[in-house]
Amino acid sequence: MPSKFKSSATIIPLEQAVGKVLAHDITEIRPGQFKGAAFKKGHIVLEQDIPHLRRLGKEHLFVLHIGPEEVHEDDAAIRLATALAGPGVVSHGPPSEGKIPLKAALRGLLKVNVEALTEINLVGDLSCSSRHNNVLVEEGEIVAATRAIPLIVDEKTLHKAVHMASDVGGVFSVKELSRPLTGIMITGNEVFHGLIEDKFAPILRKELQFFGCEVSQVLFAP
């Protein structure tokens, strides 16, 4: 169910805005260089933002006051991403506009708890998408991403989703590949008797090494 916000907006002096949440985009225009949002709705004002905002002519800001049972989108994304990440997966911050990716901490097989992921996506106000279950991923590769949909998320909604993810030990995990010692047996009279050059072993060796296997020997048989 969608959140029912209790947050309110008000105008305050610029000097009092540090730590507050912008209620709207603040546009900046630099002729021939840039035109767009210098600060986006939902941005938490930092001390170092004050000189920039002053240069934009801002002496007062329209900000949101977040209620005690509400959570800013970025904070919600961090909490959910942390709960979603199981062994071998890490959240990669900082979040941006309520979105945060999750990355593989090692090379291995991505495991997705599809049932838990589906249930979390049905909670409301939060969403999470991922790569398919049981695919090979590389270290540092993005395997999933989560986001808070509204600017302000209801604490009860967030708590429910985080609890669901934590209960299963994280929705996403990466299992390290085993590194078995393998051998290759090439059959065929032509190759065995040296009548033709074998071209299969190099291909198979490359494939096995891709999955972390060590090829101990290559044998030929009629």
Image (cartoon, rainbow, N blue to C red):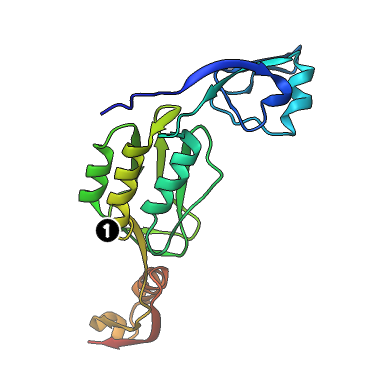
* 113 left or right of 94 in image: left
The residue positioned 40% from the left and 46% from the top of the image is: 80
Q: Position of residue 123 (x, y in %)?
A: 26, 37
Residue picked out by circle 1: 168
- Amino acid on which the number 1 mark rests in the picture: Val
Q: Is residue 213 above or below residue 110?
A: below
Residue at the limit of the structure toward the front, as seen here: 68
Quadrant for residue 206, please give it.
Answer: bottom left
Q: Is residue 149 above or below residue 86?
A: above
Q: Position of residue 148 (x, y in %)?
A: 41, 34
* 124 left or right of 48 in image: left
Can residue 143 be seen in this snapshot?
A: no
Q: Residues within 10 Å of mark 1 (few under 14, many from 20)?
A: some
* 37 left or right of 212 in image: right
Quadrant for residue 197, please give it.
Answer: bottom left
Q: Is residue 36 above or below residue 21?
A: above
The residue positioned 54% from the left and 19% from the top of the image is: 23
Quadrant for residue 217, please give it.
Answer: bottom left
Q: Position of residue 183 (x, y in %)?
A: 33, 84
The residue positioned 27% from the left and 47% from the top of the image is: 117
Quarter in which the C terminus is drawn: bottom left
